[in-house]
Structure formats: C-alpha cells, structure tokens
Image (tube, rainbow, N blue to C red):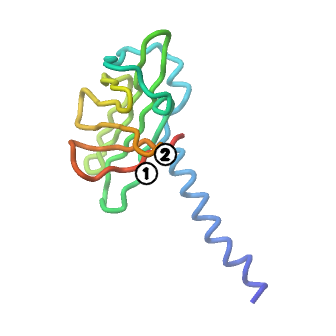
Amino acid sequence: MFRRAPVLLFPGMLALAVLSLASVALAIDPKLLDAEPTVHARLVETPDPALLGCFTRVRPSEFKRPNTYSFCLVQKGDKYAVYYDWKDGKTLERHEGWMPFSIMKDRIISDTEASTYLLKDGEVWHNFGGREAMHRMRRN
C-alpha cells in the first residue's frame, strides 16, 4: 500500500498545479498598472486600504459558464484608478482597461456595469446588480 501512495499523490499534485495556473491566467498583469490611467475613479470617500491592490473573483460553482472578474485599485498621486478585466462566460467577450468606478470607503462600484466590490468581515466580495448572492474575491 505504501508503494502506491506516491502514484496516488501525483494526480492531486497535477490538479493543484493546473488550478494554480488557471488562477494566474485570470490575474491582471502588474506591468499594466505602470501606465498612466486614462480614467480616474470618482472619490466619494477615501477607500479602506484593504481594497487597494488586485483581486480576482473565485469561480462560483453554481454557474456553468460564469463571468470572470478581476480588478486592481491603485493610488496614483492623490487620485485613485481601477484597472478592470471582466469576461462574459457565454459570449467570451472581454472588457479590459482603466474603467470608471465610484469609491465609497468600504466599496467600489463600477460605473459601466452592475458590479460592486465590498469589504465584509475583512474580505473583499463581489455583488452583481444588488442580488443576494455575493462571491469571494481572492487577492492576487
């Protein structure tokens, strides 16, 4: 039985490697953030520092072909900007670049589609269109 253990571990390790690569593929390339933003966020209230940085939505299990969402909230001088990347899971249409958002301390709200990203219990969550369901975001 002990001799089979390494063989049984290999598929698990392979699956973990594939999942890690898939999550990296969804992350925003940090080099893109070096560019000067073409759009700055509308600042209603200074963001909680926990919202700064890059996040990717954890794949919801309840959807067959879920949309993917990633954002990076950055501070450039005295202004804030959001680099946003989302892809429609059905049409595979992708929207990527500096996009307008409104910042309200514990949340950022897209000005181009129905997404809100908010802090709850120390974690960042995604809400679409005010629905009850919220999906956890993972820091990249």
Q: Name the spot of residue 21 as percent of width and height, x first.
A: 56, 51
**Amino acid type shown at disc 2:** Arg
Identity of the residue furthest to the front in this view: 121
- Residue 13 position (above or below residue 76): below
Return the residue nearer the eye: 91 or 35.
35
Q: Are marks 1 and 2 in contact (CB under 8 Å)?
A: yes
For disc 2, the marked residue is 138
Q: Which circle's residue, 1 or 2, is located before the other in the chain?
A: 1
Give SS at disc 2: strand
Task: Judge left or right: residue 88 versus residue 98.
Answer: left
Q: Amino acid at mark 1?
A: Val
Residue 130 is labelled as none
The residue at 45%/27% (across/down) is: 73
Could you say which quadrant of the image residue 18 lies in?
bottom right
State whether residue 10 is above or below residue 86.
Answer: below
Q: Which is nearer the eye, 44 or 98?
A: 44
- Which residue is at a point 54% across and 45% down the rendered structure image? 24
Where disc 1 sits, the SS reads loop
Left or right? Give the position of 136 relative to 67.
Answer: right
Residue 84 image offset from top left, x and y in percent: 38, 31
- Name the residue: 40% across, 20% down: 46
The quarter in which the C terminus is drawn is top right
Q: Which residue is mark 1?
A: 58
Measure the C-alpha gap from mark 1 to mark 2: 6 Å
Counting the numbered discs, the total is: 2
Residue lying at the far bottom in this picture: please name it: 1
User: Which residue occupies 51% across, 31% down?
Assistant: 53
User: Residue 124's spot in the image, x, y percent?
Assistant: 43, 41
- The spot of residue 109 in percent (x, y) is 30, 30
